Image (tube, helix red, strand yellow):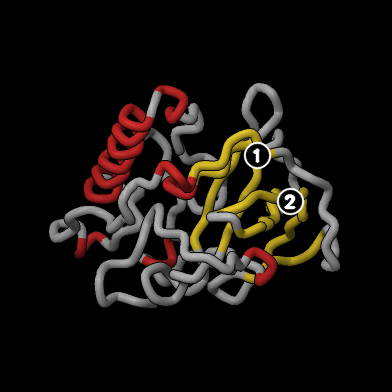
Amino acid sequence: MTDAPHDHDHDHDHEHEHHHHEGPHDYIGAVQAFRQEKDAYFKSSKGSPIPAAERDAFEGLPYFPVNVDLVFEGLTVEPYAGNEPTSFQIPTSDGRLRPARRAGSFAFEIEGEPVRLTGYELDGAHSDGRLFVPFLDATTGAESYGAGRYLDLEPDEDGTYAIDFNLAYHPTCVYDPSASCPITPAENRLPVRIEAGERLAEGAAH
């Protein structure tokens, strides 16, 4: 990983090749390798969001086990059809407002439950199809951070998207309270438990 993994700026190296094409075992190995790279970055990089005084004791981020059933491929982005304005100001953890646009939404099913997530473009910029998808779920505030977790999506070559909850990550304000992190809009609250991706350490609910 060469660039700092800034929240919501879409410059993560988040394994957009979708290695699950290669089979579950290869996919799990690819996700685990990515997690090891991120842990190494957080422990030793100057750009790490882990406070410098805590890096020596840092032993890696806590994760849910990789769940191949929480990968949804071939999704198309549908025009946003909700009741909220397309252009709006998304609040951040430090009390600011960032320009944002509801670029569209994804409809799919999790364990037979129909769900919908909105994808956003931040700072008023069209981003070559890349979308910021923060979400809340039934683990939020207990096993995962109270302001939600994030996904960065890029379109595949055919224009469809894959939502892979194993790549869900926490905002950096989990580690650095001075960071400015978008707060997940209520419309992206999922009624199910997403036991995939980054989680909080046991007993560390935020």
Pointer 1 or 2: first along the chain? 2
Q: Residue at x 33, y 51 (%)?
A: 48
The image quarter containing residue 118 is bottom right
Q: Residue at x 63, y 36 (%)?
A: 161
Q: Nearer the viewer, mark 1 or mark 2?
A: 2
Q: How many marks?
A: 2
Please tell me whether residue 81 is drawn above or below residue 178 in the rendered image.
Answer: above
Q: Residue at x 79, y 45 (%)?
A: 78
Q: Is 66 positioned to the left or the right of 60 in the image?
A: right
Q: Residue furthest left?
A: 57
- For the C terminus, the image quarter is bottom left
Q: Can the viewer see residue 75?
A: yes
The residues bearing labels 1 and 2 have C-alpha atoms spaced at a distance of 13 Å
Disc marking residue 130:
1
Residue beneath disc 2: 105
Residue 42 screen position, x and y as percent? 29, 50
Residue type beneath disc 2: Ser
Q: Which of the two residues, 177 or 81, is positioned nearer the viewer here?
A: 81
Counting other residues with Cα less than 10 Å from the Cα at mark 1, is it few (<14), some (14-19), or many (20 or more)? Answer: some
Counting other residues with Cα less than 10 Å from the Cα at mark 2, is it few (<14), some (14-19), or many (20 or more)? Answer: many
